[in-house]
Amino acid sequence: MKKALITGVNGQDGSYLTEFLLNKGYEVHGIVRRTSSFSRERIDPLQGVNAKNPGKLELHYGDMGDEKNLRKLVEKVRPDEVYNLASQSHVGISFEMPEYSTNVNALGTLRLLEAIHDYAPAARFFQASSSELFGEAEESPQTEQTPFKPNSPYAVAKLYAYWMVVNYRQTYDLHACNGILFNHESPRRGENFVTRKITQTVARISEGLEESLFIGNMGAKRDWGYAPDYVRAMWMMLQQDEAEDFVVATGELHSVRELIEKSFTHIGIQLEWNGVATDEKGIDSKTGKVMVQVNPKYYRPIDIDSVLGDASKIREKLGWEPEVKFDRLVDIMMKADLAVARKHGRDAV
Ligand code: NAP
Ligand code: F7E
């Protein structure tokens, strides 16, 4: 039985990757943080007597800030594959917590690489790098060759981690690689990322649980994919004899505004836009009701207008293709959030 160690196992990607590896018969060791209340909805169904998969999941307490703990875990588990998914992953919040974001995302990665170098040098290592490394990119679409110009504390920390991975590969011959992951979403996405915030709020509006959506920069454009497709890419990267870095993206660009319009269309509302900048409003074209308003508190000190990935390398070398693109992604997320909102609506009666 192959052994995988996953940091950030309780996150969006960690939960999908765990599911994927358990179905392949892996023994999965996941690192979870100690929290005052248990919130493990994403991974709970994968454990215990109800779990329907050939693999085995074991959870360990740990933290990317705790070097000794990481070293002990790597020594104990002796994994064949390590997936480093743990991070303070919110770009906007990284401006408020730059030091913490650096400790977890940059130094945390270094701590883990050191532990692997000392206790499991034959292990294969995947690093969740990010399209945020490109910042306001010099070219579009972005490839593995596009220069990095990070413009947030999150991205600068991820850049350090990216280069440490390359450095440990070159210096110590570790099988270590970076997935340069463009945005990827799902019904398990954290509720304060823009996709999930929109689909969740629109679903709640549909059930009469909320009045309107408050949003930040609607002009921002992203290359949004589906998280299960991206964890498949992570695994494929570790099955190669040579460790290499790959862009993982859909190659489609859409704006936050389009995402809002499409989500409202899903519940039968066509929006009309009135006003400009912070006064702009999205109006229900039938009723005249204000459905969308701008709140400047969601603006960032600096934002990326547009990022678009070119995933030719992973397509050609590994045969990876995204199965879900923007339109289906929004449908999947809206359906899931409507089911939850309907349940809340019923429970409230
Ligand atoms: P996520 O849902 O925010 O999950 C992050 C995980 O990291 C959570 O389980 C969290 O634990 C854990 N974590 C945070 N701080 C930690 C610490 N100090 N020690 C140990 N664990 C810690 O993020 P995601 O969307 O799954 O993303 C997975 C990885 O891919 C992240 O590294 C992210 O930066 C990167 N990435 C994501 C995207 C994307 O679009 N999703 C794109 C590019 C790169 P709790 O559950 O306790 O909070
Ligand atoms: O923002 C704009 C916001 O927070 C997308 C992380 O997974 O992907 C993610 O980072 C855009 C930005 O994702 C709101 O200003 C408008 O331009 O969903 P997001 P992100 O910053 O792209 C990268 C690749 C990662 O690596 C990260 O870990 O949407 N936006 N209004 C808003 N964003 C949020 N969160 N909330 C708003 O109300």
Image: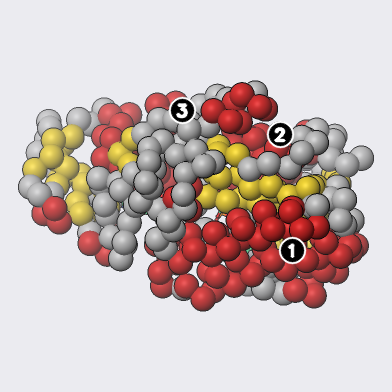
- SS assignment at label 3: loop
| Residue 165, image quadrant | bottom right
Residue positioned 61% across, 31% down in the render: 314
> In percent of the image, x 75 and y 74: which residue is there?
67
| Residue type at tag 1 | Leu
Q: Position of residue 292 (x, y in %)?
A: 21, 47
Disc 3, ligand 1: is the CB inside 8 Å? no
Counting from the top left corner in percent of width and height, residue 179 is at 61, 44
**In what element is the residue under mark 1?**
helix
Mark 2 C-beta to ligand 1 under 8 Å: no
Q: Are marks 1 and 2 in contact (CB under 8 Å)?
A: no
Disc 2 crowd, CA 10 A, few/some/many (<14, 14-19, 20+): some
Report, in whole angstroms, how far the alpha carbon at label 3 lies from the one at label 1.
33 Å
Q: Is residue 274 left or right of residue 326?
A: left
What amino acid type is highlighted by mark number 3? Lys
> Within 10 Å of the Cα at label 1, are there few (<14), some (14-19), or many (20+) other Cα atoms?
many
In the image, is 126 to the left or to the right of 264? Answer: right
Judge whether 344 appears above or below 70 on screen.
above
Q: On the image, numbered disc 1 is attached to which residue?
A: 112
Sequence order check: which comes first, mark 1 or mark 2?
1
The residue wearing badge 2 is 236
Q: Amino acid at mark 2?
A: Met
User: How much space separates mark 3 and mark 2, taking CA atoms?
Assistant: 20 Å
The mark found on residue 325 in the picture is 3
Q: Is residue 44 above or below residue 239?
A: below
List x then y, in percent, for residue 139: 37, 41
Disc 2 on helix, strand or loop? helix
Residue closer to the observer: 190 or 144 = 144
Residue positioned 42% across, 63% down in the render: 152
Q: Are marks 3 and 1 in contact (CB under 8 Å)?
A: no
Question: In terms of depth relative to the viewer, which is nearer, 99 or 280?
Answer: 99
